[in-house]
Amino acid sequence: MGFPGSAILVSAEKTTHGLVAILPTPAANANLACSSMRAAPWGGATSAAVRPWHTCGVSEIEQAVKEIEAYVAADGWDGPVRVFSLVDAEAAMAVNSTLAAELPADATGLLSIEQEGLPSSDSIDELLGRLAWPDAVDGAAISLERVTLPPEAEAEIPDDAEEARRFVAADPRREDIRMVVGVLRNGESWCTIRLRSHDSQAEAISGADLVPQMVEALLATFAE
C-alpha cells in the first residue's frame, strides 16, 4: 500500500532501462547525464514506501530528504558527495510501464534517483555549477560530509591551506557532520544534519533552511 507524500528510492535493477524515457538527457552543454540508479539497501522501491516517518503534515521534500539521509547513512561515514534527482512518482509511472509495474498502484510523492558518473570537480560550487536538469526533474538533493570546529578555534587555524587541513584533522575539538539538502523547483527546501558523535537518525536535526547557502546553490541548478 502506498502512502501519500512518500519518497521512494528506486531500485536500479528494476528501472534502469526506463530512465531515459523519464529523464531525457539535457542539452549537450548541460554537462549532466541522468544516469543509472543505485538500489535502495532495504530492497528497492516497494519496501522503501513504508519507512517509519510517514505521518500527516510531512511535506514531500521533507520526506524525500529523510529517506535519502537514511539511505546514505546505511553506507557509513567517510563517503563521497552524492547527488539525487527528485521526480514525481505518478508522472514517472505514467511514462514508464516497467516502473509502474514495480511500484504500488497508489504510490505518490517523489522518487529519489541517485546520479552516478558525476562530473569531476574541485569543489562543491564547481560541481553544482556544472549540473542542469531536464524539465521532468522536480527537484534535487545532495549529501556531503564536512568537519567543523568551535568558533574559538578559528583564530588558531593556519593561513596555509595544507597546514589548515592538518590542523583541523588533528584537532580533538573537531566534529564530523553529514548534511543532506534537498530543494524543489518551486523553492521548497529541507535539510538534515547528523553529527558523527550522535550517529542516529533520532538525533539528527532538520529544518527548511538549516544550510541556506547550499539551498541557494541547489536552487541555482534549476535556473533557466
Image (cartoon, helix red, strand yellow):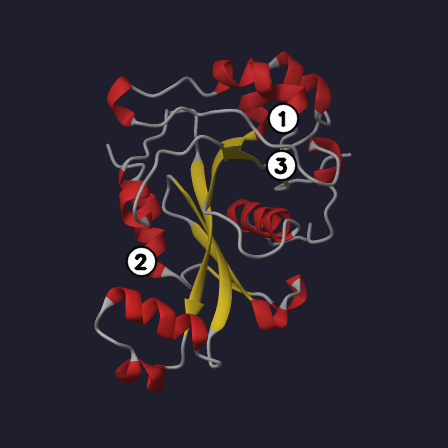
For image coordinates 57% across by 67% down, the residue present is 196
Query: Earlier along the polypeptide chain: callout 3 or callout 2?
Result: 3
Q: Which residue is mark 3?
A: 9
**Side of 57 relative to 221 (left or right):** right
Q: CA distance from mark 3 to mark 2?
A: 26 Å
Amino acid type assigned to the residue bearing label 1 in the image: Ala
Q: Which residue is mark 2?
A: 213
**Side of 193 relative to 130 (left or right):** right
Q: CA distance from mark 1 to mark 2?
A: 31 Å
Q: Secondary structure at mark 3?
A: strand
Quarter of image, res 16: top right
Few, some or many residues within 10 Å of mark 3 (<14, 14–19, 20+) = many
Task: Pick whichever, 78 or 112, lies toward us.
Answer: 78
Q: Which residue is mark 1?
A: 12
Q: Is residue 27 above or below residue 182?
A: above
Amino acid type assigned to the residue bearing label 3 in the image: Leu
Quadrant holding the N terminus: top right
Amino acid type assigned to the residue bearing label 2 in the image: Gln
Q: Is residue 116 above or below residue 29?
A: below
Quadrant holding the C terminus: top left
Few, some or many residues within 10 Å of mark 2 (<14, 14–19, 20+) = few
Q: Mark 3 or mark 1, which is nearer to you?
A: 1
